[in-house]
Image (cartoon, helix red, strand yellow):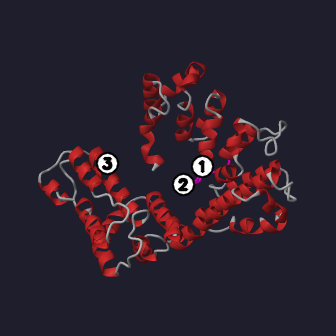
């Protein structure tokens, strides 16, 4: 704290020096209100400077580090026994908020989600100042309104709690009544609320099968067919449902969900073919993530995905398992010669480097 960030900027510091300065402003547990305000305010120099002497990647690194410091300051390092006046919050945080409002919806939602998810544990509503500011300015509106984020956060927390229920708790569960609220919220206009609801439905389904002697639940395959139709209507629920239903267990045993006679490969391909690419939701796993692991060595499936126009997913899948390069070589060769320069460039780099997901930098804009 002895050397200010303004001094560093005046000296036109190198990237490593500037990052060290930002890191030095990290808050620590037990920091006094005065020191907290000083530390947070010092970061204003980052958000109001164009950092022109740094390269684009260097600027991104410095801004990322500063953003993380703000998030930490509002959550785990927020002064625990102090009320911070609105005027002090405004002076300390408005430059950050003004800069942050220009970022993508995904970034804005992710930051707001993390701060709002922490708030009930801290009990400090003044820590939500940046979120309230973005709500008042209209930056958080419509599907990503503060209210919708709040609802989605609470449903995800409920789903996590379901996963921690003791065995005896399941004696009181009846699928028809206890799942009703999540079926209802699955129809919400906000993609955040829908995804959270699908996650909760998956968690309740899994719990009923693993701990609750059924609870009167439908067959897992019946729910998969239902979720497929929901994904076709509003993309963004299938991946969250699989997460709640503990799809990770496919590595071991998930016969209750997809018995031997159920064609999960066909389910994935049909769901992907007939739905749009889903929006990102904090803490929840996307359908494309599950698909890229499931099809990592399946050349025919990857080619079908490519034919669907899902180039990002096709490249993500094709570069998942270096051990499958020889098996996939005919397809990889074809992709490396694609008329799409991003597909061709990514696969060419993957074949040179031969490590997982090398080449995905060609698609960084889609992974924002």
Tag 1 near tag 2, CB within 8 Å: yes
Judging depth in this view, the residue of 293 and 38 nearest the camera is 38
In this figure, which residue is indicated by the disc labeled 2?
Answer: 280
Q: Is residue 365 positioned above or below 173 on the image?
A: above
Q: Where is residue 37 drawn, in percent x and y?
A: 29, 70
- Tag 2, which secondary structure? loop
Q: Earlier in the sequence, mark 1 or mark 3?
A: 3
| Total numbered circles | 3
Residue reaching furthest left? Answer: 11
User: Within the image, what quadrant is residue 72 found in?
Assistant: bottom left
Please provide percent x and percent y for residue 13: 16, 48
User: Dot 1: few (<14), some (14–19), or many (≥20) neighbours within 10 Å?
Assistant: many
Magenta stretch containing residue 278, yes or no? yes
Q: Is residue 42 visible?
A: yes
Residue 232: where, in percent of width, then height? 69, 54
Q: Residue furthest front?
A: 30
Q: Is residue 110 left or right of residue 48?
A: right
Residue 220 appears left or right of 35: right
Question: Disc 3 on helix, strand or loop?
Answer: helix
What residue would you read off at disc 1?
Answer: 286
Which of the numbered marks, if any, corresponds to residue 61?
A: 3
Between discs 1 and 2, the one toward the N terminus: 2
Q: Secondary structure at mark 1?
A: loop
How many neighbours does mark 3 have within 10 angstroms: few (below 14), some (14-19), or many (20 or more)? some
Asked which quadrant contains residue 128, the reply is: bottom left
The magenta-colored residue range is 274-285
Q: Are marks 2 and 3 in contact (CB under 8 Å)?
A: no
Residue plotted at (53% across, 71% down): 120
Query: x%, y% of residue 202?
Result: 72, 55
């Amino acid at each position: 704290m002895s050397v200010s960030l303004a001094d560093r900027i005046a000296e036109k510091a190198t990237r490593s020096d500037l990052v060290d300065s930002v890191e030095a402003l990290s808050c620590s547990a037990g920091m006094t209100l005065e020191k907290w305000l000083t530390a947070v305010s010092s970061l204003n120099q980052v958000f109001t400077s164009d950092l022109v002497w740094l390269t684009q990647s260097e600027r991104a690194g410095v801004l990322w580090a500063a953003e993380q410091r703000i998030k930490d300051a509002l959550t785990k390092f927020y002064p625990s026994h102090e009320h911070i006046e609105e005027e002090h919050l405004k002076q300390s945080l408005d430059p950050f908020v003004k800069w942050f409002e220009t970022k993508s919806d995904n970034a804005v939602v992710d930051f707001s989600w993390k701060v709002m998810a922490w708030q009930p544990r801290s009990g400090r509503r003044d820590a939500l100042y940046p979120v309230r500011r973005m709500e008042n300015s209209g930056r958080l509106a419509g599907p990503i309104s503060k209210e919708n984020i709040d609802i989605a956060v609470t449903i995800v927390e409920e789903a996590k709690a379901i996963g921690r229920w003791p065995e005896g708790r399941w004696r009181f569960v009846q699928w028809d009544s206890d799942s009703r609220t999540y079926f209802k919220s699955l129809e919400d206009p906000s993609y955040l609320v829908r995804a959270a609801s699908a996650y909760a439905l998956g968690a309740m389904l899994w719990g009923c099968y693993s701990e609750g002697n059924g609870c009167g639940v439908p067959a897992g395959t019946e729910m998969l067919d239902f979720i497929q139709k929901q994904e076709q209507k509003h993309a963004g629920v299938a991946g969250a449902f699989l997460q709640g239903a503990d799809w990770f267990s496919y590595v071991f045993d998930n016969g209750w969900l997809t018995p031997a006679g159920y064609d999960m490969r066909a389910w994935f391909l049909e769901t992907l073919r007939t739905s749009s690419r889903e929006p990102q939701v904090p803490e929840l796993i996307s359908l494309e993530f599950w698909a890229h692991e499931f099809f990592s060595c399946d050349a025919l499936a990857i080619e079908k995905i490519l034919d669907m126009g899902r180039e990002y997913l096709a490249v993500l899948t094709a570069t998942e398992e270096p051990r499958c390069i020889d098996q996939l070589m005919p397809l990889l060769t074809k992709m490396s010669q694609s008329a799409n320069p991003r597909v061709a460039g990514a696969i060419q780099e993957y074949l040179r480097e031969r490590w997982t997901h090398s080449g995905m930098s060609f698609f960084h804009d889609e992974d924002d």
